[in-house]
């Protein structure tokens, strides 16, 4: 399949580029920082991989998004600007094979980056203690989730690169989308949910001091508390739905379910996991249609 030939060449170009090496170095540094934070926070106590995964998740949520965007924002626009795309199409290769090959190459480049950085973290921790089987399994899960997270942001940048004609424009738009999804949406999702849910149920007692004097069997109090409970559940449901559109929120939620106990152990992350599958597929499908039908 000629798409695999394109992917092989594109992968070689990606992993030997200075940009990829710089991004990989940044990931390795954040992994090692997470290990150092783990060792310092558990000084004199039992060392565990869970804090390392938690520390890393908090930092890579930002760096990983930048990694994915930097990998994909000019993957197609660069070919358009340099004129190599027209030259490439004069060879026996079709547009769909080009875009599929580039997407495959980026996926394997991300896998390589995550594998290398995970081995660094595992090696650094292994010098102090022997990880258990469950911890190795959690590390594997973290690697898969991180790959999906990076590839989601790559898909966003890839779609933008397939849509616009200038790399500078693609980068500007991609950074804007990243800021909205990584910063604004997680910060303001609760306010947005409250706006969608509407105003809170009106307190029939004027203020909460009046509630304190009522019996729990008072029908007015029970009705009001039931309305508030339903309202909070509605807001929480909307907030949870909005978080699916933020890869950062989905990523941190999934990692918390892997490393924390209590509440986070019971959180259903199925929607978050599905978002890392559905979003890249939808974005790639749009990019595919746009690229294959574009007038060059």
Image (cartoon, rainbow, N blue to C red):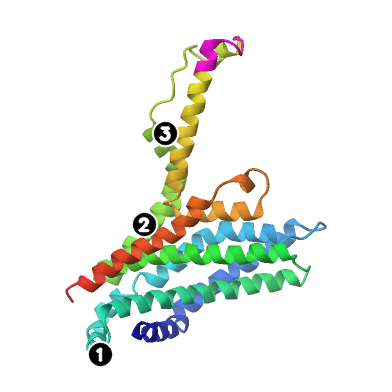
Residue 260: horizontal and vertical position, in percent?
A: 66, 51
Q: Label 2, on which residue?
A: 177
Quarter of the figure with the N terminus: bottom left
Q: Which residues are magenta?
A: 214-223
- Residue 100 horizontal side relative to residue 108, left or right: left
Q: Does dot 1 land on a helix, a strand or a loop?
A: loop
Residue 288: horizontal and vertical position, in percent?
A: 29, 69
Residue 76: horizontal and vertical position, in percent?
A: 30, 75
In this view, the residue in front, 55 or 221, is 221
Pointer 2: residues within 10 angstroms few (<14), some, or many (20+)?
some
Q: Does dot 2 land on a helix, a strand or a loop?
A: helix
Farthest right residue in view: 44
Identify the mark nearer the N-term, 3 or 1. Answer: 1
Q: Residue at x 59, y 70 (%)?
A: 29
Q: Nearer the viewer, mark 2 or mark 1?
A: 1
Above or below for 3 versus 226: below
Identify the mark nearer the N-term, 2 or 3. Answer: 2
Residue 127: quadrant of the picture: bottom right
Alpha carbon separation for disc pair 2 and 3? 23 Å
Q: Label 3, on which residue?
A: 194
Q: Is residue 164 visible?
A: no
In this view, the residue in front, 70 or 131, is 131
């Amino acid at each position: 399949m000629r798409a695999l030939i394109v992917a092989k060449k594109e992968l070689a170009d990606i992993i030997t580029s200075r940009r990829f090496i710089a991004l990989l170095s940044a990931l390795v540094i954040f992994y090692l920082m997470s290990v150092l934070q783990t060792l310092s926070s558990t000084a004199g106590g039992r060392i565990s991989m869970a804090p390392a995964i938690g520390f890393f998740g908090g930092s890579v949520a930002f760096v990983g998004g930048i990694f994915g965007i930097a990998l994909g924002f000019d993957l197609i626009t660069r070919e358009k600007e340099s004129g190599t795309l027209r030259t490439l199409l004069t060879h026996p290769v079709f547009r769909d094979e080009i875009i599929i090959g580039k997407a495959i190459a980026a996926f394997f480049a991300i896998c390589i980056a995550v594998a290398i950085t995970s081995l660094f973290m595992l090696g650094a921790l292994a010098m102090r203690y022997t990880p258990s089987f469950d911890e190795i399994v959690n590390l594997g899960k973290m690697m898969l989730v991180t790959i999906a997270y990076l590839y989601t942001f790559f898909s966003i940048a890839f779609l933008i690169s397939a849509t616009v004609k200038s790399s500078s424009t693609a980068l500007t738009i991609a950074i804007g989308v990243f800021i909205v999804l990584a910063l604004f949406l997680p910060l303001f999702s609760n306010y947005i949910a409250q706006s969608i849910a509407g105003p809170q149920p009106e307190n029939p007692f004027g203020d909460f001091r009046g509630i304190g004097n009522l019996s729990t069997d008072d029908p007015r109090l029970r009705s009001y508390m039931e309305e508030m409970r339903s309202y909070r559940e509605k807001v929480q449901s909307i907030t949870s739905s909005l978080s699916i559109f933020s890869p950062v929120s989905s990523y941190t939620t999934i990692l918390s379910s892997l490393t924390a106990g209590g509440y986070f152990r019971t959180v259903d992350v199925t929607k978050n996991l599905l978002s890392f599958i559905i979003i890249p597929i939808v974005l790639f499908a749009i990019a595919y249609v746009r690229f294959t039908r574009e007038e060059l």
